[in-house]
Amino acid sequence: MRKVYRGRDIEVSFDLDICIHIGECLRGERNVFNLNRRPWALPDAGEADEVARVVELCPSGALLYQRLDGRPQEKPEGPTRMTPIRDGPLLVTGEVEVRREDGTVETLPRATLCRCGQSEHKPFCDNQHLAIKFRAPGAPFKIHLSPVRPVLDKPITKAEDPRGAA
Ligand code: SF4
Ligand code: FES
């Protein structure tokens, strides 16, 4: 379920179900993305170009933005590319239309798709690969430890994630 955080110049939306807890958001723009505040995402607390830049670093597509100030919207990088992440999901960049198990379809500019077969939110990765210690070759991926990912090999649950209620 995607939540929308509306600002004056830019609107940010967030879908906790597909977040893979890499933490780019929390380290990127601390005034905008702040777990100690409700709402946790406040687009007007930063400059819209910077908010857009940080959102585009979110690999999973959990964070998206919509410019409200007439500036260009995010253009998916083309052509669509898939990169296996070492011991983890497939990283897709470029326009991708994803059909969820409930039949809803979302077009995303970025996505992380399950490669281990254990996700409960297929086709998206939900970090179950960590629980089964999935091992497969692929590109290394930088994970930033943060309150939503205190240790490398175990993200917090959706119920524990403060962004769920914010
Ligand atoms: S995938 Fe990473 S950057 Fe995107 S919302 Fe989740 S923690 Fe933030
Ligand atoms: S690759 Fe992450 S849950 Fe399957």
Image (cartoon, rainbow, N blue to C red):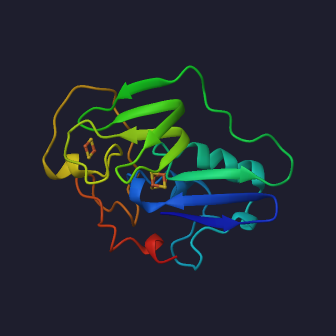
Residue in view at x 29 percent, y 67 percent: 157
Q: Is residue 127 visible?
A: yes
Residue 84, placed above or below residue 103: above
Q: Is residue 31 visible?
A: no
Extreme residue toward the left, this view: 132
State left or right for residue 150 relative to residue 61: left
Residue in view at x 77 percent, y 56 percent: 47
The image quarter in which residue 136 lies? top left
Residue 62, placed above or below residue 95: below
State left or right for residue 48 relative to residue 79: right
State left or right for residue 18 relative to residue 52: left
Nearest the eye: 162 or 24? 162
Please give the count of numbered marks on the rendered protein: 0
The image quarter in which residue 72 lies? top right
Residue in view at x 81 percent, y 55 percent: 68
Nearest the eye: 101 or 73? 101
Residue 115, placed above or below residue 153: above
Residue in view at x 46 percent, y 51 percent: 104
Extreme residue toward the top, this view: 79
Rendered location of residue 27, percent (x, y): 53, 56
